[in-house]
């Protein structure tokens, strides 16, 4: 059986030998296995300058531009340097593209990765390409293709699952991110990650630090339960950090992965991932209404609102659940109670409150239906007037044109359910500051950043503010309980999220201590080589 040096191969690529030397030493502090991208070196490769800096297993690679590399000379010259690399004594492994592998003989104990790269598509004959590769003299077979559709994702995962020899098959690009991690569940000996996040070498390649902070790749196996976040975009989301750290804290063999899913593609993506299988999904923009349509069973709130942010796999399909509604109402109720306590007054009931909701998408639907049930007087506005009118008709409330939102005279609670103000557009606000006033409660469902421009304006005008972090944590906690049957500690989740969002983050070793894990156990459940354990990703 093949023994891989590590489950993560850190990729180092620099143009100067001096900087390559520095980065090889730094990478060895975090990784036990390094791919040395010799094609990036601007001058002729000098193995004698590199060898003194070897502190772990190395994989030598010289990639052509057509395969995503930078080798500037002829293929004949490239093969000559590859042969030199093999006999140099620097490398335990060497990467050989499938079309040239037969021209390079095996030498000594150096193991061979036979690779295929397609930077433009997932070819129709992917399975045929793989079957031909298996006939070659290789120890590991690597296929990296650009995935553009749910069907591409489906075919890549299916190939990895049927592998009869050590294989690493994954999709590049936003669509393929999850396939890189899922390859480990389905038998891949390792996956690749950038040592230096600032040097993008292939579309969608994760960084080594992602596996120190967010994804427990060293503990993933065939029994690992998989949960996914479906949305577009998903790159900004802190859900993976929150859920994966809670899995760690409760010693669960599970992983939570983001899957970019364009509008209208939710059903196709869940079908593509069925083979994994995925036990449950978090659903975000723009799929919360589509999630209801994709389900075969519904809890009452999801059914009545037509919006769901959670899909649980069942023998007959999916159960749709809405955890946004109770999270939003609970966050608002606590904010109103806290403000009344601070003022020495009696907190108002929702039936006494006039609420203006900005937006008419999935989050707005969930919150509007929840507030309607508790008697609030609601007005809905949206940049798409037809959607606002339709939602208001379903609820039985008022609506107004987006251009008229500043003219709403009765407003005790303002709720932003649009993405306006979300990272990276952090200086935008969905409403002019002049609308805000003392005594108004302003609730922004955006949580990245926590203090949006809307909330900064509201605070400056002495309004009562409610951060999207509060709703996010509550809905995530409810999802975690649905996924695992475990009721998590809300304060712990708030602390984890705020650490993750803070640039002043401390190491997550304390999480291992709180979980009762030894340092070695923490490493095993997601730590790095070197024994530091997980660290919270900085915002």
Image (cartoon, helix red, strand yellow):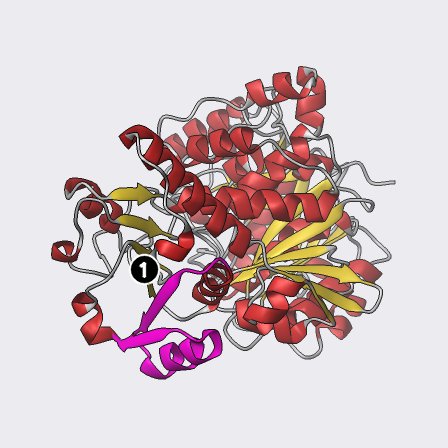
Q: Quadrant of residue 14?
A: top left
Q: Position of residue 351 (x, y in %)?
A: 41, 56
**Residue 398 colored magenta?**
yes
Q: Residue at x 72, y 37 (%)?
A: 486
Q: Is residue 526 above or below residue 206?
A: above
Span shown in magenta: 374-401
Say which quarter of the image contains residue 354: bottom left
Which corner quadrant holds the C terminus? Answer: top left
434 or 153: which is nearer to us? 434
Q: Residue at x 30, y 29 (%)?
A: 344
Quadrant where the N terminus sits is top right
**Which residue is farthest left?**
434
In this view, the residue in front, 448 or 397, is 397
Q: Position of residue 531 (x, y in %)?
A: 62, 19
Q: Nearer the viewer, residue 92 or 32?
A: 32
User: Residue 47: horizontal and vertical position, in percent?
Assistant: 52, 34
Q: Is residue 487 above or below residue 130?
A: above
At which x and y percent is residue 492? 54, 28
User: Label 1 belongs to which residue?
Assistant: 354
Q: Identify which residue, 457 or 224, lies in the foreground.
A: 457
* Residue 301 colored in magenta in the image: no
Asked if one can make out residue 37 in the rendered structure from this viewpoint, the answer is no
Q: Left or right: where does residue 126 sit relative to residue 258?
A: right
Residue drawn at the location 42% of the way across and 33% of the way down: 498
| Dot 1 crowding, Cα within 10 Å, few <14, some 14–19, many 20+ | some
- The residue shown at (41%, 53%) is 350
């Amino acid at each position: 059986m093949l023994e891989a040096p590590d489950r993560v191969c850190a990729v180092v690529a620099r143009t100067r030998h001096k900087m390559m030397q520095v980065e090889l030493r730094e990478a060895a502090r975090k990784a036990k296995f390094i791919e040395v991208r010799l094609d990036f070196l601007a001058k002729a490769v000098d193995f004698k300058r590199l060898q003194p800096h070897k502190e772990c297993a190395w994989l030598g690679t010289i990639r052509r531009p057509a395969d995503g590399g930078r080798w500037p000379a002829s293929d004949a010259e490239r093969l000559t340097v590859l042969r030199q690399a093999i006999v140099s004594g620097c490398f335990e492994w060497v990467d050989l593209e499938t079309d040239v592998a037969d021209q390079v003989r095996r030498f000594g104990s150096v193991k061979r990765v036979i690779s295929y790269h397609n930077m433009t598509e997932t070819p129709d004959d992917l399975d045929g390409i793989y079957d031909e590769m298996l006939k070659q003299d290789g120890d590991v077979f690597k296929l990296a293709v650009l995935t553009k559709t749910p069907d591409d994702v489906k075919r890549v995962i299916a190939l990895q699952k049927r592998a009869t020899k050590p294989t690493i098959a994954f999709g590049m690009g936003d669509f393929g991110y999850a396939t890189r991690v899922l390859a480990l569940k389905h038998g891949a000996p390792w996956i690749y990650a950038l040592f230096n996040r600032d040097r993008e070498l292939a579309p969608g390649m994760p960084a080594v630090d992602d596996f120190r902070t967010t994804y427990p790749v060293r503990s993933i196996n065939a029994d690992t339960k998989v949960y996914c976040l479906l949305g577009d975009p998903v790159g900004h989301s802190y859900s993976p950090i929150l859920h994966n750290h809670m899995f760690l804290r409760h010693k669960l063999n599970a992983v939570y992965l983001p899957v970019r899913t364009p509008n209208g593609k939710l059903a196709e993506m869940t079908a593509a991932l069925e083979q994994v299988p995925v036990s449950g999904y978090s659903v975000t923009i723009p799929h919360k209404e589509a999630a209801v349509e994709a389900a075969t069973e519904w809890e009452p709130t999801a059914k009545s609102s037509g919006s769901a942010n959670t899909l649980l796999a069942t023998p007959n399909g999916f159960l749709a659940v809405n955890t946004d509604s109770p999270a939003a109402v609970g966050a608002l109720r606590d904010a109103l109670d806290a403000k009344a306590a601070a003022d020495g007054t009696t907190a108002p009931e929702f039936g006494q409150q006039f609420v203006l909701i900005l937006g008419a998408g999935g989050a707005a639907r969930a919150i509007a239906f929840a507030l309607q049930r508790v008697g609030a007087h609601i007005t809905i506005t949206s940049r798409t007037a037809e959607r606002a009118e339709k939602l208001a008709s379903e609820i039985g409330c008022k609506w107004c044109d987006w251009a008229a939102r500043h003219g709403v005279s009765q407003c005790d609670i303002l709720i932003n359910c649009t993405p306006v103000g979300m990272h990276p557009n952090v200086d935008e606000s969905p409403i002019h500051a002049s609308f805000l006033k003392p005594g108004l409660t302003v609730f922004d469902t955006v949580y990245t950043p926590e203090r949006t421009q809307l909330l900064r304006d509201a605070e400056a005008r002495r309004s009562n503010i409610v951060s999207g972090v509060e709703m996010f944590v509550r809905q995530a906690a409810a999802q975690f309980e649905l996924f695992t049957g475990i009721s998590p500690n809300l304060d712990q989740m708030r602390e984890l999220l705020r650490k993750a969002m803070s640039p002043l983050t401390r190491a997550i070793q304390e999480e291992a201590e709180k979980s009762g894990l030894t340092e070695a156990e923490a490493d095993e459940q997601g730590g790095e080589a070197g024994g530091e354990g997980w660290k919270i990703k900085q915002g």
